[in-house]
Image (cartoon, helix red, strand yellow):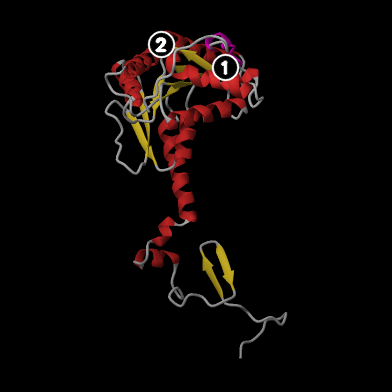
Amino acid sequence: MTSTNGAGRRPRPTRHRGPVTLRGGEPDPQERGTTTDQRLLDRRGPTDWVHTDPWRVLRIQSEFVEGFGLLAEMPRAVSVFGSARTPRDSEHYKTGVEIGAALADAGYAVITGGGPGAMEAANKGACDAGGMSVGLGIELPFEQELNEWVDVGISFRYFFVRKTMFVKYAQAFVILPGGFGTLDELFEALTLVQTRKVTRFPVILVGSAYWSGLVDWVRQTMLVHGTVSEADLDLLHVTDDVAEVVALVQQAESARVAEPGGMRLRPAQHLPAADESVPSATVDD
């Protein structure tokens, strides 16, 4: 017969898992009389546990630690986005190389997704100009190595961790012509700036022929329906001039230093007017 304690309650089976105490129920007979260290070193069993959500949390944490550790001492930087499908003989690729080189000459590290196409172009320009060329890759169903012009690179499992690195270490976003992934980064950046989740910084669309259709739609549809405000349009800059890209980045940095947290650029003149004719966009992604 099981004895009771002073309060008249039967003692329950007690077992420990690290700092956790578990009472009630029967302990696993395979774990009775063993320690956590012993089970760790001795056991060879199913591996399903590595795919559970608690283990994924640790994996996510490790990606943040790796990213922060790698990039924490990086100099001021600009994130450059664009299509992985941009061919090397295209004008968009040439522009990407020029932008990478111009940013490097101005003292900025260049961060891209580390892939081919427009990302490769920006990395190549920065690398050839002697600047710091960074690639933040992503694990995809198909193989995609970091391009050869990446000086410092890391590949992530999770898109949201990678996105944090793009935003945290950038002074500005430069957006070359691209597809869904590029649009994803573009609108996430705009949302973070619009809602003041990040210190205001410029979002620069390079290639008026490619982007003006989107900008017109924002003005003629979203603004008309009241889903964005006139001030929100100031968050976008459209240009074809590489020198203007660098000037906008430098202007933003100067404003941020002079007025931390309160920077407001006024680049509305870079947006085409609603009644201004613009070249048709060409989609290559």
Query: Which residues are drawn in magenta?
Result: 264-271
- Is residue 198 in sight in this rendering? no
Q: Which residue is farthest bottom?
A: 1
Q: What element carries label 2?
A: helix
Q: What residue is shown with label 2?
A: 242
In what quadrant of the picture does the N terminus appear? bottom right
Q: Which quadrant of the view contains residue 257? A: top right
Q: What residue type is labelled 1?
A: Arg
Looking at the magenta stretch, what is its main secondary structure?
loop
What is the x, y in percent for residue 268?
58, 11
Choose the circle earlier in sequence order: 1 or 2: 2
Nearer to me, 13 or 102? 102
Q: Which amino acid does label 2 sit on?
A: Val
Q: Which residue is farthest right?
A: 7
Nearer to me, 134 or 219? 219
What is the x, y in percent for residue 153?
35, 32
Q: What residue is shown with label 1?
A: 256
